[in-house]
Amino acid sequence: MIGIRSLKLTPRNNHVICTSAFFLRLGCAEYIPNYHAQHRFSHIPNKQNINPKQTIFYAFLALGGVIGGFALYEHKYKLFRVKLDGIHIDEISSTESKEEQPNWHMNARSDLPTYNMDEVQDHCNIEKRIWVTYGIGVYDITDFIAKHPGGDNIMLGAGSAIDPFWAIYQQHNNKEILTLLEFYRIGNLSPDDTISTDDMGSPWANEPKRHPVLRPASTRPFNGEPPLKLLVQNFITPNEFFYVRNHLPVPFIEVNKYELEIAIETTKSGTKEQIKTLTLQDIKGLPKYTVTAAIMCGGNRRSEMTKVKSVKGLSWNAGAVGNATWSGARLRDLLLEMGVKPNENLHVVLEGADLDPTSHPYGASIPLSKALDERGDVILAYEMNGKTLSRDHGYPLRCIVPGNVGARNVKWLTRIAVSEAESNSHWQQSDYKGFSPSTDWDTVDFTKSPAIQAMPVTSAICSPSEGEVLKIPADGYLTIHGYAWSGGGRRIVRVDLTADQGKTWHVAKIQQEDQPDGRHYGWSLWTGRIKMETTSTGEVEIWAKAVDSAYNVQPETFENIWNLRGVLANAYHRIKIKII
Amino acid sequence: MIGIRSLKLTPRNNHVICTSAFFLRLGCAEYIPNYHAQHRFSHIPNKQNINPKQTIFYAFLALGGVIGGFALYEHKYKLFRVKLDGIHIDEISSTESKEEQPNWHMNARSDLPTYNMDEVQDHCNIEKRIWVTYGIGVYDITDFIAKHPGGDNIMLGAGSAIDPFWAIYQQHNNKEILTLLEFYRIGNLSPDDTISTDDMGSPWANEPKRHPVLRPASTRPFNGEPPLKLLVQNFITPNEFFYVRNHLPVPFIEVNKYELEIAIETTKSGTKEQIKTLTLQDIKGLPKYTVTAAIMCGGNRRSEMTKVKSVKGLSWNAGAVGNATWSGARLRDLLLEMGVKPNENLHVVLEGADLDPTSHPYGASIPLSKALDERGDVILAYEMNGKTLSRDHGYPLRCIVPGNVGARNVKWLTRIAVSEAESNSHWQQSDYKGFSPSTDWDTVDFTKSPAIQAMPVTSAICSPSEGEVLKIPADGYLTIHGYAWSGGGRRIVRVDLTADQGKTWHVAKIQQEDQPDGRHYGWSLWTGRIKMETTSTGEVEIWAKAVDSAYNVQPETFENIWNLRGVLANAYHRIKIKII
């Protein structure tokens, strides 16, 4: 692919190259919302090993015009409705399309003029209009800025090339978005201003191998889930079959250079402001705790919600969950040792080594009360099911926040901060939150909903599968398997099944650990048996609903819990099977 | 009313009278399930002032044949389905019926023989068959024993009079149950064996006065709720308008004789077994904490669930909830001072001074983890909204267990025990629990469900009222008020309203305290505005649903959460109004 423009060492370019990842604070920082983390970059080289190719690549990223914000909503559009002046694109799907992608951006259009990069760079603010390049296409995206789902992030690309961003957020590379882009085309980039990216390395070059059973919801970043029948065959999910949810390329970390920084950023924590740095050996030297905890993606079961109305997000089936034992040091012990006292208004901000194209790390936060709670069981884990963490699951260190949405279980943990504010990351502020079914992208205000922490009660039927054709055994009983889980340590107390739209409910038999309520972080597997009419054939619909220890129950339908991000998809699980 | 039989001082009678309340362990204890509390009676006289009339009354209770167990399920049948050999009574309602009650038991039947009390007493086991008396009727209830909703408790009445029990559990006194009883009639009691109960005092003689706005769901014991429109006029519910939920007669306690016993019954608590006795002054001398907490009856909104199918329990509307500030000592402080350490397997058993006819106190328990949790805010409260607790609300001391079902907030608290087992009371073991909609009284096994502790998310529309006729104001907006609450300290994060069956949802404005999640024990009041078609007239249905901080949401309908006890009735609240 031809992408990144050639570099001319104009004074401006020179400045940009030298500052590399620091571009943001020296250059266009005014375009970057919530950019308060500048100091963090100074220690990144000590903490992780970014290979030289990646370093160059990221430097190029920093140059550039970017529409990467497109993708900051979980980097995947399932269904995306845009209505523009002349174009009405009803559905833009980013699922790994096998169809031929248009390559308009690779070809010059004779009906349009040619511009050089200096001219493009001159168009980096609203007054002069916003231009970007992609391939050899030049685009005026000014009129799209306000409609960009990622908000101001699109301004990172003003006056520059978006190729490096789209190399990471590959879901842009589909027919619909390319069609949208082409609509804004105003010209061709001068041949002198193009270079090849082929030899620049790729942030995806160091991705780990995954077990082929993990069905990808996206490949870059990798997100994959196991088949449901496999998922419920083990109470403890084997590491290889544990769903993978990556927001960014997997960082490559040399463990002997790895350090974890713990910062106390406020004296309201009851102690002085301070920074402590720990090696992995230091952490392994602390008392070791093991907790069984299911981790579930906030978007698990999104594909069911999508059937009501399109949402933005990866199209997860019900497999974006797994149950494992996690071993490591207790965050509570570390914080108490540093003198931190309970304070209901403070937060613990967690950062990973996975960086977005602007060199911002993945980040999330949890309330300090959860971190300090002896029953909260928050762990800095270096082992998963007794084995060293794999790279996909956060090697060398991951924060396990039992009972909370997966997004708070930050992987490749490099920094922990006790802070007066929640994480300012996109994923804390503008992503994993719930809204009313009538809230749409025109009316949504992410400041109005709290970040998801503890998850609501849910369950899924894992066997038989949707659409499966079955013969009822001689005893007349249909056997059904699945899982159930609730956040906040709430134990599952009952799973009800029905094969007749709720006229009769059958209580499933539950397999779970004998953990106390409020600290029951593992999932429950269940088996139900429903006596069928031996003469009955044809389609049967099975519903499952779980009840947790607070007697919260799943809502019945997706219609009334639909939300624009497709999170918290915990309505009754319903499958149709065929009896022969 | 003619009721209790005369006493003949036969050797057996003499024994029974002398042992008074201790009858149970010396006499028919084998009939009494879960009777492990004998030692408790030894200190009762020191703790409360039972007036002499009541003492005599309870002594008589101990004599007697009793079918009081009829009523141990919250002492109130709303709808009760019984099918017997020749009689099919479809619906037995105990709401305070204004209709004339039959008095068959007061009249001799010439078609039946006469028995004396000795003959009745001889029939106190299954082999000889079970007889009881009521008024001057003699009944053979053997065939009803297995069908008795209260289980073995019915055997307390074997061979004796049930009048004293029914004097307390007055809901028996309705046409349907009297009809059922008359079906079992086998004779008349000899005139020599009847005495009047008129001069024996009544356990109801010391009931406090209640504010007339409290609509009684039952009068003996008193259970009453305020009108919904009144309920949401104050964020802090005035004491007089706070719903009252009594399971038994209100005890009369002289505060200068009042003592609270705190017992450590197991060394697994990390300290030695011990008993500590505190006066109210002692408790007031401890650090005083105040917590805002809503208390909600487990059966709140039961009247809505009943519309699906009959349940057993008081027919509460949505007013069995109130929001107050509670002040007192923290249970955690007391337990820590006694050396109690966290233990996930232990319980704190709470007992009140309100006694059932067998002299068992009302009892409940909570997990020790809740009692010790700094964020659990369990209070031994002597003040409600800054005023001394009223008798109806537990004077002089009530346990406040924020976030948990009302039934655990034990009133007239006399004893606290750190124990290896949950309370063995009926209300902990066989009452406030949830079941699958397909579980009925033939299949229910109360050991299979956990006692309700934290409550699920709920809400109610309090204004307008069901059926109200309204004119839409000039601005076209319909204004709706209500409350929402979730257990476990989970904050309400959203209330959605719809006037078009969920096609569009309107987010209500919420009024709540600024308390952190997990410790947000007060309720939330909300106000919604729905723009109506100004031309629209006729019936409109409004739905409300709340979402808590774990993003748990109310279930849609009562059909799929129905349970035989009618608890946990938290489906969408729906009202129909008429627009003119």
Image (spheres, coloured by chain):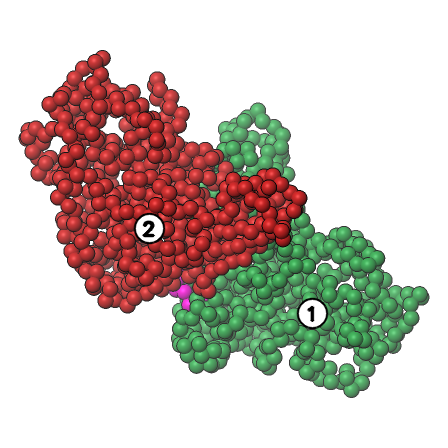
Chain colours: A green, B red
Residue drawn at 66 percent across, 62 percent down: A73
The circle on residue B338 is: none
Q: Amino acid at mark 2?
A: Arg
**Apparent side of residue A436 relative to residue B433 in the rendered image (left or right):** right
Residue drawn at 77 percent across, 65 percent down: A144
Return the chain for callout 2.
B
Residue position marked by numbered label 1 in the rendering: A152
Q: What's the distance in space between the residues labelled 2 and 1, CA to CA?
A: 51 Å
Q: Nearer the viewer, residue A83 or A338?
A: A83
Q: Secondary structure at mark 2?
A: helix
Q: Amino acid at mark 1?
A: Asp
Residue position marked by numbered label 2 in the rendering: B408
Q: Position of residue B366 (x, y in %)?
A: 32, 53
**Apparent side of residue A305 relative to residue B520 in the rendered image (left or right):** right
Q: Residues within 10 Å of mark 1 (few under 14, many from 20)?
A: some
Q: Nearer the viewer, residue B486 or A4?
A: B486
Residue at the extreme bottom? A11
Using the rendered view, name the quadrant where residue B127 is placed: top left
Q: Nearer the viewer, residue A199 or B399?
A: B399
Using the rendered view, name the quadrant where residue B73 is placed: top left
Q: Nearer the viewer, residue A95 or B303?
A: B303
Q: Which residues are magenta?
A: A370-375
